Image (cartoon, helix red, strand yellow):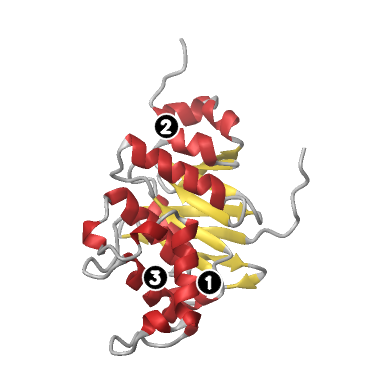
Amino acid sequence: MTERLAQPLLRANGLRKAFGAVQACDGVELDVQPGELRAVIGPNGAGKTTLISLLAGELTPDNGGIEFDGREVTALPASARARSGLARSYQITSLFPRFTALQNLLLAVQARSGHAFHFWRPVTRDRDLIEPAQAALARVGLSARADVPVAALAHGEQRQLEIALALATEPKLLLLDEPTAGMSREETQAMVTLLEGLKREITIVLIEHDMDAVFALADSITVLVYGRVIATTAPEAIRNDPAVRAAYLGEQESA
């Protein structure tokens, strides 16, 4: 059995977040080790997207704390967390559709460097920008689509590009919210293959409904139900857990 590191890269301590009477996160505890791909699953309304928004700094917890890379980050805004190496992709595509794939990447690279994007400057000749942008495209298999407007990319390619945008910020950890949402079977398999390669290089927290993708990718799985963690363990143990099957997989225990 592989020995776990004592210090997690990401830790959530008793996170709570309510929206009116709805407790979207109810004392969530989460430790993610360096190099791990942790899947977070649960039925609709379980609090998964709320959790990832809390981790990314887009929501402020009512109670609890978040540590990243040995540092308390609970009070840091999303921009500061991104600069510290915590990157997020979204369930809904958030790209510039009239820009090419490469131009979208150039925006991300310039944001990482702290400079505004200047449309009137020949940025495609700036090697400090173009080289990391092209490298990010290559990592997700989109080099041949660099000059294609986002609006002309297939849905699966757009999701790959979103991951490239996150990678362009040179993150230590990726938060991925439903990366296979709306994909065909072929596109989903391409995304799984992409993530299989990335998990060897970077720590990932993955929210995903496609259970085939989850079981193909995850090192460990956390199950949320009504904002509470009901299990965190290895994929095979999750598959065979009666409480998880009843709550999420829709199966009933044998009489």
Q: Which amino acid does label 2 sit on?
A: Ala
Labels 1 and 2: the sequence-earlier one:
1
Give the SS element for disc 3: helix
Q: How far apart are marks 1 and 2 (CA)?
A: 30 Å
What residue lies at 45% left-to-right and 37% top-to-bottom? 213
Q: In this picture, is 79 found above or below 142?
A: below
Residue reaching furthest top? 255
Q: What residue type is labelled 1?
A: Thr
Q: In this picture, is 124 found above or below 156?
A: below
Give the SS element for disc 1: loop
Q: Residue 74 carries which label?
A: 1
Q: Which amino acid does label 3 sit on?
A: Leu
Q: Which mark is residue 247?
A: 2
Give the SS element for disc 2: helix
What residue lies at 51% left-to-right and 24% top-to-bottom? 242
Q: Do the residues labelled 1 and 3 touch (CB within 8 Å)?
A: no
Spot occupied by residue 130 in the image (x, y as percentages of width and height): 44, 76
Q: Residues within 10 Å of mark 3 (few under 14, many from 20)?
A: many
Labels 3 and 2: the sequence-earlier one:
3
What residue lies at 64% left-to-right and 72% top-to-bottom? 71
Report whether 211 appears left or right of 220: left
Q: Disc 3 marks which residue?
A: 105
Spot occupied by residue 28 in the image (x, y as percentages of width and height): 52, 53
Labels 1 and 3: the sequence-earlier one:
1
Q: Is residue 52 visible?
A: yes
Q: Distance between the residues labelled 1 and 3?
A: 28 Å
Q: Residues within 10 Å of mark 2 (few under 14, many from 20)?
A: some
Spot occupied by residue 37 in the image (x, y as percentages of width and height): 57, 48
Q: Do the residues labelled 1 and 2 touch (CB within 8 Å)?
A: no
Q: Can residue 22 be seen in this view?
A: no
Q: How crowded is mark 1: few (under 14 residues within 10 Å), some or many (20 or more)?
A: many
